[in-house]
Image (tube, coloured by chain):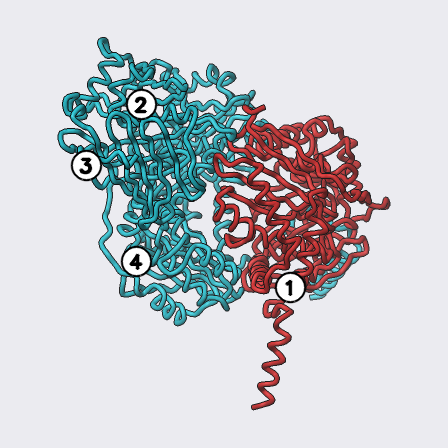
Chain colours: A cyan, B red
Amino acid sequence: MKNIKSFIIFLAISILSGSLFAQLDRSIQPKPGPAPEFKIDEYQYFTLDNGLKVIIVENHKTPRISYQLTIDVDPVMEKETTGYVSMTGELLRSGTTNKSKIEIDESIDFIGANLNTYQNGVYGLTLTKHKDVFLNIMSDVLLNPSFPEEEVEKSKKQSISGLVSSKTNPEFIARRVGQKLRNPNHPYGEIATEESIENITREHLVKYYNTYYKPNTSYLVIIGDITLKEAKKDAEKYFGSWEKGTVPKHEYQFPNKNIGTRVALIHNEGSVQSYINITYPVNLKIGDSNAIQAALANDILGSGVFSARLLANLREDKGYTYGAYSNLTKNKLVGNFSAYAQVGTGVTDDAVNQFIIEMNRMKDELVDDETLDLFKTVRNGSFARSLEKPQTIARLAFNTLRYNLPVDYYQTYLEKVEAVTKEQVQAVSDKYIDPKQAIIVVVGDKTKLEEDLKKYSSNGKVELYDIYGNPLKKEIKKAIPEGVTTKSVLDNYFNALGGIENLEKITDFTIVATTNMNGMEIKQKTYSKAPNKYAMIMSMNGNVMMQQAFNGERGIMKSFQGEQEIVGEDLENLKINATMNAEMKYDELGVKVTLEAIEAIHNKDTYKLKVVKPSGETTYEYFDLESGLKVQSKQIIVAPQGEFTQKQNYSDYQEVDGVKFPFTIQISGVQNMELKVDSVVINSGLSDDLF
Amino acid sequence: MKHKQFITLLLLIFSIPVFAQDNKIEFEEYNLDNGLHVILHQDNRFPLVVVTITYHVGSKNERPDKTGFAHFFEHLMFEGSENIARGEYSKIVDKAGGTLNANTTWDRTYFYEVLSSNQLELGLWLEAERMLHLNVDSIGVVTQKKVVTEEIKEREENQPYMSFQREISKRAYKVHPYQWTVLGSADHIMSATESDYKEFYNNFYVPNNAVLTIVGDIDFNKTKKLVEKYYSDIPASKNPIYRPNKVEPVKNEEIRDTIYDNIQLPAIFQAYHTPKSGTNDFYAVDMLATLLSGGESSRLYKTLVDEKQLAMQVMSFPFPYEDAGLAYTIALPNIGVELTDLEAGIDAEIEKLQNELISDIELQKLKNQYEANHVNGNATLESRAYNLAINYTFHKDANLINTEIDKFLAVTKEDIKRVANEYFRKDNRVVLYYLPKSQQ
């Protein structure tokens, strides 16, 4: 007994003295207290009569509410009009049947809220007290968008400018080219270009909206300072009248696996760094039985913690880069692997090498227990921390519903991570991390990289691409077949139109066409009379906006600004343009025509003619190889702001009295519009007074 | 009945000028004997804790021949300490299931850990380790020199337009150290020596130049004891901390220049000299910038992007400098638009503000926007930890986290017109045209 008592006293003294006198031993890393419990907050879920699925996460910490609406539909192939699906989303908030864009902007900003609309979705954040004002606008934007013509044109102009501003951004280029090359013939591989944006019309947006924006394929996620009861009432009030409908489904073939490594190089002149993006498609979906194992494998390889192998190797060991990472992205249709870094030009070769070494190591070696434990802790810690944000709770709820996951999928997430073995990590790595099926996309200085990168390509070739992922033509143009001449192309054209005989029968014609500008309908009437009289009248609601007339000698232009005589080069050009069947009289008009090449327009081969008027004005005319018809004329305009291309596309040729006329004319470039021909009348005996 | 009505009316009157403080952020603050300032904010609704240390040192404390040092030093702070080997610092946080990072500006360097609340002591130990006895070996130095050089390339050189800060700063400032950027010069960093780091560390990484904030699921008493345990015996520096007192002279001549960059779409960068942060004029300038480009109904956006379609994108914002800084206006034209037309459009909007008072509705819109920003800006533990730390570091007033909104709400229409005239003068700005290299 005695002994024990003195022992206790001794212990008490030593504790006391320790806290009072001893130096703090800083070499001892503090031990954690008992681990707290991280709970996943509850979410609520209900469906409106129109099929809209609504998820609510109540959280009253901050007096605000966010609303996120997602249209869950299959992607579509956008082809030569790529960009319209995303533009449809972006323009939702650019005008409704009730409000103009500026009214929407003013009312959103006035309450200090955000409202973003984007591809297949709407997101907004508002203070609780402004909720009803906000919902009024959000519901209007979603249910009644009007896609005003002028907003479509504005958005096209901005998108094209945006693309041009990113043309020298290596990350932007490497990502998009990677996306395109790994998803051939799949909507995921379609990337917008200046040309595809130019081809978009309002009708594309309206049609997409009317077909795909339906409540029964949509989710509304409400997060924040609101009760279930109120949220239900609001959802019914603001989204209940949205009409359900049948939404088309689309299926696509999974992209073929690459056999062997490919190297795709995009030249960036004088670049001091190279952007490397090693990528390929993978078949991995949220909720797959090996999804968590795969996520852990990728964490070890390329997550943002310094112990991850890519960072440890390329940054902390070699100092090649500020950051090197990899992603293994899950997706319902086509997932992808992507490993990337921006590295000094001089070390690009070895950086690619290190990427491949680290990728192979994941497959070839078992990770050690310490590494696996570390990354399990990192993943679980990150999962647990993320639960602070109600957005996380909402995302988990959304995934559970959208991907039909077991109800306890996320409740048991931490345990699932804990249960992963190193053998499983190796097995999923073997399946998903494979440099042999990769496309190594590099954006950098070609002159310094091309030779060095050849060794990584299975066929020893470096494929060269432009910034939009189009293969660079090796300057070998398609040969013009023997016997084809300028004359034969033009003769062919005349035949395709209906034959010289029919063409020469025309003494006059009148074309009435319609176009839309800034939401307004504009009528264009063109009169033409042999040998070279021409007049054009543009009007809106019956009011003449502009007219032009040429009587064979004098040309006049009338507009709001008054009357103006056309003189000089413009007059000379007009004389030629006004000539009936001018193409048949090029020689006598002094127009020089040369057959330049075979070039593809909208993926179809055409003969390209260079047409130079005596004034020096140059246009290029393209004639379809198959039909013989003219499909495009192109002019380069040199202005103080730079060079611009103005194009006219001709399509929908229809026969009138034995002669074909294009019934759709798309004008793009500095000005964009589409002319639809309403009628063509031939030989009505036009009076000379018209001109 | 009548009485009640009176009170309601009274409430209404009082609630107009001052933001209703339903979400006041409560905190405690105190100094240790060594000068370390400690701020504690408790929120037990989720078992996380955020530990941050702000050192009041940024690129403005650098010598003109050693630029980029503060940022480079931020990298070195992850290299290890007397008790933590190279490469282990962040691994310890990883193993605890936490996260950490840091960032540097012209005026301060900010370090943080986010941990589950049972790991609070670990966070305090870690930050104390590098405050007391950082240890950087030569391999670490060589590697980080390379990493920072690549960082400069990645962020500035190999990105279209991104040299703008460097180009504006060196023209805007002749006296003040804001003339160089935070990333500084790769040459200076490559040539830095061991004694340079030691000096920098001893001068600036000291408790009397630091603010420690601890935010989240904590117990005040226990936390204070832990702070005492790890920080009380870290010695304060004996030398006064170098704070540049250089004041940039008032400008009276516009500076214009052209930069030829690897771009295809040109751009305009304008920068006006603005007052010191925290002054009444600064709040008015900030609001003016929001008036110009905050939201799609803002003046520049509405006029230039929507109506005239001169711009693809336009934004106006003051940089968060501590000393008298710069308010930027950046505009990217739509393709084919002349920069001179775009600039005339921007200038016309500024002139309007100089000549006409804004409307009551516009002022109310601005106030509503700031009220929403105030709520959104303090929604997470991390943002609260940051705001408390920065407000104390720059203004010695952590409570600005609650009261800064009132300073914004106190700005009048007349204030906006006045600062438009006082600061947004053409002879008080730098204008750069960014043009494609091909046009050189």
Q: Residue furthest bottom?
A: B1
Tell me the amino acid under the disc marked 2. Glu
In the rendered image of this protein, does residue A262 appear above or below residue B223? above
Chain that bears disc 4: A
Image location (x, y in percent) of residue A158: 45, 41
Q: Earlier in the sequence, mark 4 or mark 2?
A: 4
Mark 2 lies on residue: A621
Tell me the amino acid under the disc marked 1. Leu
Q: Are marks 4 and 2 on the same chain?
A: yes
Q: Are marks 1 and 3 on the same chain?
A: no
What is the distance, in whole Å, between disc 4 and disc 1 at their CAs?
41 Å
What is the distance, in whole Å, between disc 1 and disc 3 at their CAs?
68 Å
Chain that bears disc 2: A
CB atoms of marks 3 and 4 within 8 Å: no
Image location (x, y in percent) of residue A32: 60, 53
CB atoms of marks 4 and 2 within 8 Å: no
Mark 1 lies on residue: B409
